[in-house]
Image (cartoon, rainbow, N blue to C red):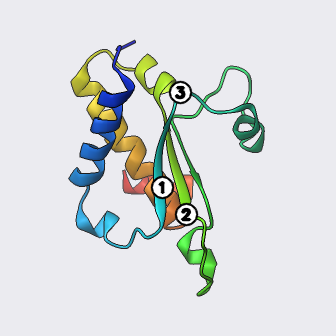
Amino acid sequence: MFEVSDERFQELMNEALASLPDVQTENLKNVAFLLEQEPTEEQRQRNNLKPYQTLLGLYEGVPLVQRQGMQTTLPDRITLFKRPITEMVHSEAELKEQIRHTMWHEIAHYYGLDHPQIHSLE
């Protein structure tokens, strides 16, 4: 586990977002990027997680491909969960890479990609 303050984790999230290619971020609109310690019980239930499973990140909203011109007023949410991410890394370099990877993964869900499509792109 790598210890890091919430402030530094947030800085690394901002850096990760800025480091992603424009093609992945230029069409992001009305998306809030959040930091939480871990998934809530409701989030765990909605994602059918077993007790030994967790989430590193979570996209909550209506993917672009499903909107069909519909406008939303509340922002979509991309949440990164600090505890599960920091538990799987051992250095700041690993943390930066995991945050960037998780951020990209959740943005891919915003665009409507499912897990098989995301894994094929990785």
Q: Nearer the viewer, residue 82 or 100?
A: 82
Measuring from the top left, give residue 73's x and y in whole percent: 60, 72
Residue 76 shows in the view = yes
Distance from disc 3 to disc 2, alpha carbons, whole Å, reads 20 Å
Measuring from the top left, give residue 23's x and y in whole percent: 28, 69
Q: Nearer the viewer, residue 3 or 89?
A: 3
Q: Which residue is mark 1?
A: 32
Q: Secondary structure at mark 2?
A: loop
Residue 119 shows in the view = no
Q: How many marks?
A: 3
Q: Check the image and report above or below for 34 versus 39.
A: below
| Disc 2 residue crowd, few under 14, some 14–19, many 20+, Cα 10 Å | some
Q: Secondary structure at mark 3?
A: loop
> Does 43 sit left or right of 111 as displayed?
right
Distance from disc 3 to disc 1, alpha carbons, whole Å, reads 16 Å
Q: Which residue is rendered at x = 51% and y = 44% of the image?
A: 79
Three-letter amino acid code at disc 2? Pro
Please tell me which of labels 1 and 2 falls first in the chain. Answer: 1
Callouts 1 and 2 close, C-beta under 8 Å: yes
Measuring from the top left, give residue 18's x and y in whole percent: 24, 53
Q: Secondary structure at mark 1?
A: strand
| Disc 1 residue crowd, few under 14, some 14–19, many 20+, Cα 10 Å | some
Measuring from the top left, give residue 64's x and y in whole percent: 54, 73
Q: Which residue is mark 2?
A: 75
Please tell me which of labels 3 and 1 falls first in the chain. Answer: 1
Please tell me which of labels 3 and 2 falls first in the chain. Answer: 3
